[in-house]
Image: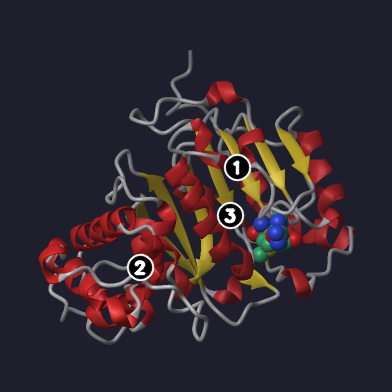
Amino acid sequence: VIKSATRPPMRLPPLPTIRDIVKLYRLNAAKQLSQNFLFDTNLTDKIVKSAGNLEGAYVCEVGPGPGGITRSILKAGAAKVVVVELDKRFNAGLRLLSAAAPGRVEIVNADILTYNLAKALPLDLAVPWEGDPPNVHIIGNLPFNVSTPLIIRWLEALALRTGPFVYGRTQLTLTFQKEVCERICAPPRSSQRSRLSIMSQYLCRVKHCFRIPGKCFVPKPDVDVGVVHFTPLVRPRIQGVPFKTVEKVVKHVFHLRGKYCRKGAAELFPPERQDLLEELFAVSEVDPTVRPWQLTMSEWDRLAHAYWDICQREPWVSDYDFRTMKGEKFEVPPMPAVGERHT
Ligand code: SAM
């Protein structure tokens, strides 16, 4: 038996280069799908290496395009790659690859925003959540207008252990516009700390792997790109509060990023019930004069719990949303008498 460390990389038979495939099949980048291709094998190998050891892995690649990253995944020894690509023009090039690696490439023409990844791979790959991550990976160089809504969708799926997370703590390796990548990975007190930092980091260990200058893509986008690796945490850093509730608290508090966190949090409650705002900060023991970007994860955890406790006691609070119901009439129950208040 050859040990995996010494096993040679899985060679593919000679194939036309990705640049040639693009020429051969006249795959002009479609502007409306924000297509920017990577032709440089060193770069596609580096992205794939960021995912970790792919020997025998099952990979779902999102947006393979002409297949540069797909080739690197196959070379890294993946047992199977399911490629989810919206644009059928790439099928011919991807079929070439499938013929070169028989039984290892499955082409799915679908929109990744609606495709159910829980069905993409065999369910017997699933492993217990508390153990090591499964040998299942998601890798993708997606357009920026897809990758940001997609990561929020996947973070919710992660919290619910649905979609790609029916297999366990499936790891993700994805590209983002450099600024978005910095926001995802920003630590507390950093100038980039934002809603995306909290939502990503309460559920995952995130790593900014490396930056790819825009000039490495064809055609060249206006921005640089960052590669982020996500490993779902065994125990989220905010537990026992639904994802949507955490998201609501984080969204409101960050709404006024440069102001005291009390200011954004005030919008979680109607103006006539600011006693609940007092309760939120008293119970969570968070300093209301700290700025949202300075809050630590443990402070976010306490804020989310304090808000969730209020919602459970006074369910109408969950339905109140200052930002979406401006001008709308909202029936606010009267404030309890002084002796009955919670603060
Ligand atoms: N992976 C290739 C590379 O690195 O050279 C192509 C990257 S290109 C930035 C993004 C790819 O995602 C395109 O092939 C595009 O057609 C595909 N795509 C865009 N939106 C998609 C969606 N909603 N679902 C699946 N694929 C999508």
* In this view, the mark in front (1 or 2): 2
Q: Spatial distance from mark 1 to mark 2, Cα to Cα?
A: 36 Å
Residue sitting nearer the eye, 39 or 155 = 155
Percent position of residue 111, x then y: 73, 54
* Residue appearing at x 29%, y 41% in the figure: 235
Q: Tell me the SS state at disc 2.
A: helix
Query: Residue 302, located in which quarter of the rendered image?
Result: bottom left
Q: Cβ–Cβ below 8 Å for labels 2 and 3?
A: no
Q: Which residue is mark 3?
A: 44
In the rendered structure, the answer to whether residue 137 lies left or right of residue 314 reads right
Percent position of residue 58, x then y: 58, 33
Ligand 1 rendered quadrant:
bottom right
Q: Callout 1 environment at 10 Å: few (<14), some (14 to 19), or many (20+)?
A: many
Q: Which residue is mark 1?
A: 73
Percent position of residue 128, x then y: 40, 25
Residue farthest top in this picture: 1
Q: Spatial distance from mark 3 to mark 1, Cα to Cα?
A: 9 Å
Residue sitting nearer the eye, 278 or 236 = 278
Q: Callout 2 environment at 10 Å: few (<14), some (14 to 19), or many (20+)?
A: many
Q: Cβ–Cβ below 8 Å for labels 1 and 2?
A: no
Q: Which mark is residue 250?
A: 2
Say which quadrant the C terminus sits in: bottom left
In the rendered structure, the answer to whether residue 149 lies left or right of residue 336 reads right
Kind of residue at badge 2:
Val
Q: Tell me the SS state at disc 1.
A: helix
Q: Cβ–Cβ below 8 Å for labels 3 and 1?
A: no
* Residue appearing at x 43%, y 78% in the figure: 322
Kind of residue at badge 1:
Ile
Q: Tag 2 or tag 1, which sits nearer the N-term?
A: 1
Query: Residue 253, located in which quarter of the rendered image?
Result: bottom left
* Residue appearing at x 55%, y 79% in the figure: 223
Q: Tell me the SS state at disc 3.
A: helix
